[in-house]
Amino acid sequence: MFIGMDHGTTGISFCIMSNDGEVLDVFKIGREESKQGKVSAVEELKKRIDLDAVDLMAITYAMGDGINKILPIDKVEDRGILSINGAGKVTGGGTSVFSELEATGIPAIMIPGLHKNSDSLDEMFRAAYSHQASPEKVSICYNAFMETGWNNMIVADLSSNSVDILIEDGKIRGAMDACVGAMGIVHGPLDLEMIRDVDEGRRTANECFSHAGAVKIAGIGGKVANMREELYKKYAGGDKNAILAIDTAIMTIAMEIAGLIAVANEEIEGIVLTGSLGSTTEPFNFEKEINRYLKNKYPIEIISKESGAIGAAQIALDVYNGKKSILGIPVEF
């Protein structure tokens, strides 16, 4: 039995996978509920499986910028991160889940993020951006790779954040994170006005980042977990600002995908969409809208919104069976 964990923005997702790669269950717990002790990740797992039957678990946590290899959890210092600051809204829910899982003694590996010290990435991407993507993007890419079989593709994880990753020859070459590129529902790039707000003390950079996505245009605030639902409700009701917000987010995502295609050394086989925004069909069809810009030039595949957890379980399974590299990232196990 294998477990994959996706440390996402609005909650922590788990995938339980059999020895032959069959997905047995996927479930999600909210960050706030976990922090408040209303729900226990371990107890939820125990309801579904015997923990003693777990051969290996793959964990993603925060930015993952303290490691650049897939490593056993007992060889990772400070949970594999340099700092929790500047990483979006911090609730503490992910931290409590990590502590719970660590205490079980289940054999576990940690997946790194993509950053300036990731030796497996293109040196130009590393020189340009100190941080490119958090660890669950690696597991999402692995699920995309397993689902499509494409060696050359763009993987677009579009939800609270928008992060686009370039894969060439079956390896991650580089990515663009939400703070420098396209808008998501909640997070987005810091523009000149926000930089001025930071310099003049009106807001912190993290506060700007955490309200720089489509919600900025739509004028939506409140809890992160509720923002997408409110935005979609306003869009469906014909709210002009909500429509402009979605249209603008899609435009910025198209620009980012097109930019990665432009710098690709290999011919792109297709584009993989995932995340709550990327998989949306109502009240708008994201695939149709993005194709207005991409002109139907590339095959598009939509994979599960839970691809982060599923891909992490697939990584656990393959690492357990002896794989020494995941999308170009070294494995020490």
Image: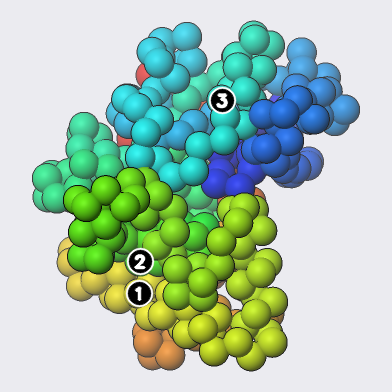
Question: Mark 2 falls on what kind of element?
Answer: loop
Type of the residue with mark 1? Thr
Identified by mark 2, the residue type is Ala
Q: In the rendered structure, are the residues bearing label 1 and label 2 in contact, judged by CB atoms less than 8 Å apart?
A: yes
Q: Quadrant of residue 87?
A: top left
Residue with the mark numbered 1: 252
* The N terminus lies in quadrant: top right
Report the front residue among 78 and 323. 78
Mark 1 burial class by Cα count in 10 Å: few <14, some 14-19, many 20+:
some
Residue 305, position as x, y percentages in the image: 62, 57
Q: Do the residues labelled 2 and 3 touch (CB within 8 Å)?
A: no
Q: Name the residue under label 3.
A: 95
Expressed as whole percent of the image width and height from the top left, the position of residue 26 reads: 74, 44
CB under 8 Å between discs 3 and 1: no
**Mark nearer the N terminus (2 vs 3):** 3
Q: Which residue is drawn at 12% across and 45% down?
A: 127
| Secondary element type, mark 3 | helix
Res. 225 in view? yes
Residue labelled with disc 2 = 182
Q: Residue at x 54, y 89 (%)?
A: 240
Measuring 37% from the left and 33% from the top, which residue is drawn there? 85
Image quarter hosting the C terminus: top left
Identify the residue at horizontal 49%, vertical 15% (top origin).
Answer: 73
Dot 3 alpha-carbon crowd within 10 angstroms: few under 14, some 14 to 19, many 20 or more: some
Residue 100: x %, y % from top left: 66, 17
Residue 151 located left or right of residue 200: right
In the picture shown, does residue 325 fall above or below 250?
Answer: above
